[in-house]
């Protein structure tokens, strides 16, 4: 029988390393073991939280002073049909393991996050999105069915016909209704291991929004990078990346481009510098002057030659956070948080402009700012709107911690006044009220 003991007590840290807590951590490898853990929780009067890849920036997968179930040992691929693209997996399977399993059969995950290290169970619990959210919605729209273990230990099957209320509540429900023990997803058919990519610099936030409005309908993916340090008429300047799948016959060698070895990012940058140590070179640039220099250099480089078109492997386009493994170490000793509001299209431009200006006035620059387009969905705890999100990474130091908390309070008021929502997978600062 599973027991609650200090031997299971561990320090658990958020991905950004700014939030941590002590939890009783269990790592089951079977469904029976999961049931034992839930029974133990009932006997001991403890709450149970669930943890996948541990990629949430905030406290979503910590559950301090209570029980935490690490699902990474439940990682079998249970069924795969290469004719239909339907796959059934356990919750601990990672996005990397998923795409590697299906790509040579001509399929790709319909929603890809910025890192391939997320688990499918965790991604379903947070209902994650990708650079194509405005076209295909969040991951939940591509989940066909799942088996859910309730707090009682009972297992129920949920889909859009059977237990449909639970289906729409558990996806994006943070594990509050139970734990996914298997999930069936529909993959996306692809005809090449490459994407047609176009990049184009934009001189202001207004130009960024105009580009999204004009090209989103004709793009399978679209994402913008914003120079958070630009001011005045250049406020919100940056560049936009959009990509499209290749249609059948457009790739002369699809069997080659779909091979695993032609998708991996590789261990070295420029063929010589190990990616595992690049974070060391980032540290000097995580100050205000460093951010200004880096952003200015990136924008200037992007402007040289104007718009660019090229073909790029799926992995290299999607998983930008995997280019620099452990880049979060550059933010040590305390870490980073990400603030990502979702705001309706009618008010997003003015709200984001106000937020960018506020960060500059408070002298708290964000080190990476990303703009995405979204559409609504029908899940109970949806964060999505018919509008935009702007994700901002902030470094936390001993000197700025309190000022940064005050800044997030001010940004909260801007978001709420604009009719916006918040993304709990990223949140570290929201108050209960």
Image: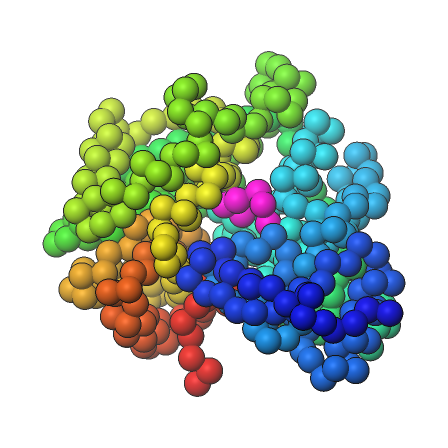
What stretch of residues is rendered in magenta? 112-118
The residue lying at 57 percent from left, 73 percent from top is: 64
> Foreground residue, 292 or 188?
292
Quadrant of res 148: bottom right
Please state if 41 lies on the left or on the right of 408 as rendered: right
- Classify the position of the N terminus by image quarter: bottom right
The answer to whether residue 130 is above or below residue 357 is above
Query: Residue 290's x, y, as percent?
Result: 21, 44
Q: Is residue 204 magenta?
A: no
Please state if 173 lies on the left or on the right of 18 as rendered: right
- Classify the position of the C terminus by image quarter: bottom left
The answer to whether residue 77 is above or below residue 381 is above
> Foreground residue, 130 or 100?
100
Q: Is residue 114 magenta?
A: yes
Quadrant of res 242: top left
Query: Residue 87's x, y, as percent?
Result: 77, 44
Q: Which residue, as the protein is rendered here, is positioned at the far left?
A: 232
Residue 377 visible? The answer is no
């Amino acid at each position: 029988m599973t027991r609650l003991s200090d031997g299971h007590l561990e320090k658990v840290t958020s991905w950004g390393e700014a939030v941590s807590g002590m939890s009783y951590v269990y790592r089951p490898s079977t469904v029976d073991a999961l049931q034992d853990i839930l029974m133990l929780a009932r006997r001991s009067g403890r709450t149970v939280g669930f943890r996948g890849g541990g990629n949430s920036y905030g406290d979503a997968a910590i559950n301090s002073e209570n029980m935490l179930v690490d699902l990474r040992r439940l990682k079998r691929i249970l069924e795969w049909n290469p004719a239909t693209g339907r796959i059934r997996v356990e919750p601990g399977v990672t996005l990397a393991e998923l795409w590697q399993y299906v790509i040579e059969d001509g399929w790709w995950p319909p929603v890809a996050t910025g890192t391939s290290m997320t688990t499918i169970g965790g991604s379903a619990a947070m209902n994650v999105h990708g650079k194509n959210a405005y076209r295909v919605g969040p991951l939940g729209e591509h989940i066909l069915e799942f088996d859910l273990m309730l707090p009682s230990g009972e297992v129920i099957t949920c889909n859009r016909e059977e237990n449909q209320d639970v289906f729409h509540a558990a996806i994006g429900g943070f594990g509050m209704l139970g734990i996914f023990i298997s999930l069936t997803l529909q993959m996306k058919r692809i005809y090449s291991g490459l994407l047609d990519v176009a990049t184009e610099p934009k001189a202001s936030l207004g130009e960024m929004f105009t580009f999204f409005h004009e090209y989103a309908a004709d793009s399978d993916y679209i994402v913008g990078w914003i120079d958070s340090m630009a001011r005045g008429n250049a406020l919100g300047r940056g560049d936009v990346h959009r990509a499209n799948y290749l249609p059948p016959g457009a790739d002369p060698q699809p069997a080659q481009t779909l091979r695993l070895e032609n998708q991996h990012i590789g261990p070295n940058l420029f063929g010589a510098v190990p990616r595992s140590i690049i974070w060391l070179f980032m540290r000097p640039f995580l100050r205000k002057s460093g951010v200004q220099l880096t952003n200015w250099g990136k924008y200037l480089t992007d402007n040289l030659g104007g718009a660019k078109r090229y073909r790029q492997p799926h992995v290299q386009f999607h998983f930008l956070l995997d280019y620099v493994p452990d880049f979060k170490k550059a933010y040590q000793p305390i870490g980073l948080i990400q603030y990502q509001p979702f705001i309706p299209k009618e008010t997003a431009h003015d709200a984001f402009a106000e937020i960018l200006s506020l960060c500059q006035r408070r002298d708290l620059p964000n080190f990476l700012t990303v703009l995405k387009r979204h559409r609504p969905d029908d899940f109970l705890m949806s964060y999505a709107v018919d509008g935009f999100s702007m994700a901002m990474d902030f470094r936390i130091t001993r000197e700025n911690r309190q000022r940064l908390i005050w800044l997030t309070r001010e940004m909260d008021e801007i978001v709420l006044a604009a009719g916006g929502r918040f993304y709990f997978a990223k949140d570290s600062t929201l108050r209960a009220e």
